[in-house]
Image (cartoon, helix red, strand yellow):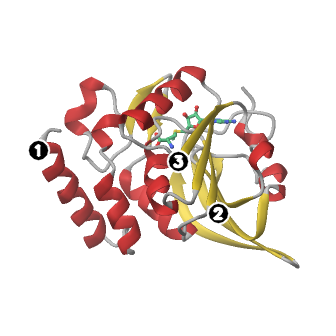
């Protein structure tokens, strides 16, 4: 443990609270618990607590902390829930969510790039996290083997909302997904008995969701 990282983590969390991205104690606690430096490549560790995306290899990025905070708050993730993440990347976002669902909950994360999925798995193990399952595959199809989910979110931008993700959501469940290509809108969908409620949470920038219900390779 490097005490400098602990100080930098506390500063970042204070900034995210001050700027209104972190609103709840649960999200604040999760950010304080998870060491972002363990999820970024060695040569970028000194930038681990900058509020910016960082390269993680294969042309992909770990999302900016403020975006992860926005997504966690919008999804209102509760203890004991079953959550599906599309786009494991480094595993950091899934690690934050693992703290929100606690020991009785579980996070499933799916990544299409094998080397990243393997790295995410190792990062999670190194951080002592045991309630996240990492799968390799096309997350635009969801992950039917563990469905239905209380919450589903994508960390990459889809051309439209993939039907399988709606199908795999529980009634009263929430889906959060960037829609567009690179420059996109963050959309929150709530599944209700009589249909769906959609809310536009604003503009954002994400790498594309590639795959069957995603952008073309
Ligand atoms: N959540 C990640 C983190 O905490 O590091 C950030 C993920 S990065 C912004 C988006 C990821 O989505 C990339 O790793 C990319 O390979 C992945 N991706 C894109 N299309 C996908 C698909 N169809 N299925 C699964 N993963 C996909």
Say whether residue 177 is visible. no
29 displayed left or right of 207? left
Res 131 label = 3
- Is 185 situated above or below 37? below
9 displayed left or right of 118? left
Direction right: furthest residue = 194
Q: Classify mark 1: helix, strand or loop.
A: helix
Mark 2 or 1: the one toward you: 1
Res 3 label = 1
Is the residue at mark 3 in contact range of ligand 1, meaning its CB lies under 8 Å from it?
A: no
Of residue 213 and residue 13, the one placed in the foreground of this image is: 13
Circle 1 crowding by C-alpha within 10 Å: few under 14, some 14–19, many from 20: few
Residue at the image position 57 percent from the left and 58 percent from the top? 105
Residue at the image position 40 percent from the left and 66 percent from the top? 27
User: Which residue bears the numbered disc 2?
Assistant: 187
Does the residue at mark 1 contact the one at mark 3 (Cβ under 8 Å)? no
Is the residue at mark 2 in contact range of ligand 1, meaning its CB lies under 8 Å from it?
A: no
Q: Quick check: which quadrant has ligand 1?
A: top right
- Is 170 situated above or below 121? below
How far across and how far down the image is residue 52, in percent? 34, 46
The first of marks 2 and 3 along the sequence is 3
The first of marks 2 and 1 along the sequence is 1
Q: Quadrant of residue 137?
A: top right
How far across and how far down the image is residue 22, in percent? 36, 69
Q: In which quarter of the image is residue 132?
A: top right
Residue at the image position 39 percent from the left and 31 percent from the top? 55
Residue at the image position 75 percent from the left and 47 percent from the top? 146
How far across and how far down the image is residue 40, in percent? 34, 33
Does the residue at mark 2 contact the one at mark 3 (Cβ under 8 Å)? no
- Is 68 situated above or below 145? below
9 displayed left or right of 20? left
């Amino acid at each position: 443990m490097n005490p400098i990282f602990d100080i930098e983590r506390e500063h970042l969390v204070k900034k995210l609270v001050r700027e209104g991205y972190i609103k709840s104690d649960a999200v604040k606690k999760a950010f304080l618990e998870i060491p972002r430096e363990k999820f970024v490549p060695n040569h970028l560790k000194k930038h681990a607590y900058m509020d910016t995306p960082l390269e993680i290899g294969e042309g992909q990025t770990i999302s900016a902390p403020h975006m992860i905070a926005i997504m966690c708050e919008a999804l209102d993730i509760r203890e004991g829930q079953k959550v599906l993440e599309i786009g494991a990347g480094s595993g950091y976002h899934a690690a934050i969510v693992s703290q929100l669902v606690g020991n009785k909950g579980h996070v499933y994360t799916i990544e299409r790039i094998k080397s990243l999925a393997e790295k995410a798995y190792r990062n999670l193990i190194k951080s002592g996290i045991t309630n996240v399952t990492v799968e390799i595959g096309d997350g635009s199809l969801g992950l039917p083997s563990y469905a239905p989910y209380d919450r589903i979110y994508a960390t990459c931008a889809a051309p439209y909302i993939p039907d399988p993700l709606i199908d795999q959501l529980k009634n009263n469940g929430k889906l959060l997904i960037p829609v567009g290509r690179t420059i996109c809108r963050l959309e929150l969908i709530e599944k209700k008995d009589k249909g769906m409620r959609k809310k536009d949470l604003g503009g954002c920038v994400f790498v594309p969701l590639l795959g069957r219900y995603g952008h073309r390779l």
